[in-house]
Image (tube, grey):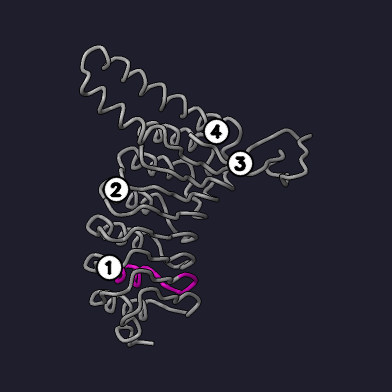
Amino acid sequence: MSNFVDIFNNQTKINMSFKSIGDEDAAAIAEALKVNTTLTEIDLMYNSIGDNGAVAIAEALKVNTTLKVIKLCNNYSIGDEGVAAIAEALKVNTTLTKLALRVIVAISNDGVAAIAEALKVNTGLIEINLDDNSIGDEGIAIIAEALKVNTTLKRIFLKGNSIGYKGALAIAEALKMNRTLKWIYLKENSIGEYGTAEISAVEKYRKDKFKEILLCLKHYDYSLYDAMSSYYKKNICDETFIELDDYINDYYDSDDEEAYNYGGLKSRSVTIKI
């Protein structure tokens, strides 16, 4: 499997998952992506791509101008070097809108930091999937700092990343500043009821704080007040959905929602709107 230029020719979407693709084939795919002008989505999940293959793909992403979606999930040999290379590509790539890096596993805080730095300057991505990478509270705090300044990301998937109360606090602080995120996936973490409460409380902060600013401006600058009122209606009042596990009492019972044991407490999946 080497003539990927011909394989990709005139294709817009291609699924190459479960093809036992290693670094050598990944490098060949990367060379094809450098010259391809039709492909918008490529699925490379569940292969054997490692750091060398990821670096090659990253180099292609720096010059490709048509690809919008790339899925690299469950390539267990990609580590910090590969992730850092992809992050560097994100700093210059403006066409990629969705990046899936679920279950890379080998990402440390160095890799997370590289992604975070990319998110601070990237202007194309609207969705990133980092599910099941055991990022932890420290790593999530790094991501949260990037979310404070990112202005294009709409969806971030953070399921199964060992996020606890401290991580929830970091996310809550980021949400007080971020105005573009519309969906945050936080299921299968250890946020608990107190972490959930911190994130839920963002609604009051975002709306009331902005209303205070508007109230102040109304007395001093009507033109700016009108402009900010319009911004408020378009941005602040839009709902952000946060999916997580809602902790409830052991006696919880419901006919239409499945309750299950989780961490010694019963919990159910809920969506918070802020």
Q: Nearer the observer, disc 1 or disc 2?
A: 1
Q: Which residue is mark 1?
A: 66
Amino acid tagged 4: Gly
Q: Which residue is mark 2?
A: 117
Question: Tag 3: Cα neighbours inside 10 Å, few (<14), some, or many (≥20)?
Answer: some
Residue 1 seen in this snapshot = yes
Q: Nearer the viewer, residue 213 or 196?
A: 213
Q: Earlier in the sequence, mark 3 or mark 2?
A: 2
Residue visible at 38% across and 66% down? 70
Q: Which residue is mark 3?
A: 270
User: Would residue 150 be counted in the magenta stretch?
Assistant: no
Real-space Cα separation, disc 4 to disc 3, in angstroms:
14 Å
Q: Earlier in the sequence, mark 1 or mark 4?
A: 1
Q: Quadrant of residue 124?
A: bottom left
Q: Which residue is mark 4?
A: 195
Residue visible at 42% across and 37% down? 238
Answer yes or no: do the residues labelled 1 and 3 have beta carbons within 8 Å? no
Question: Tag 1: Cα neighbours inside 10 Å, few (<14), some, or many (≥20)?
Answer: some
Location of residue 55 in the rendering, given as x and y in whole percent from the top left corner: 31, 68
Which type of secondary structure does the marked residue at label 3 adopt? Answer: strand
Q: Main secondary structure of the magenta part?
A: helix
Real-space Cα separation, disc 4 to disc 2, in angstroms:
25 Å
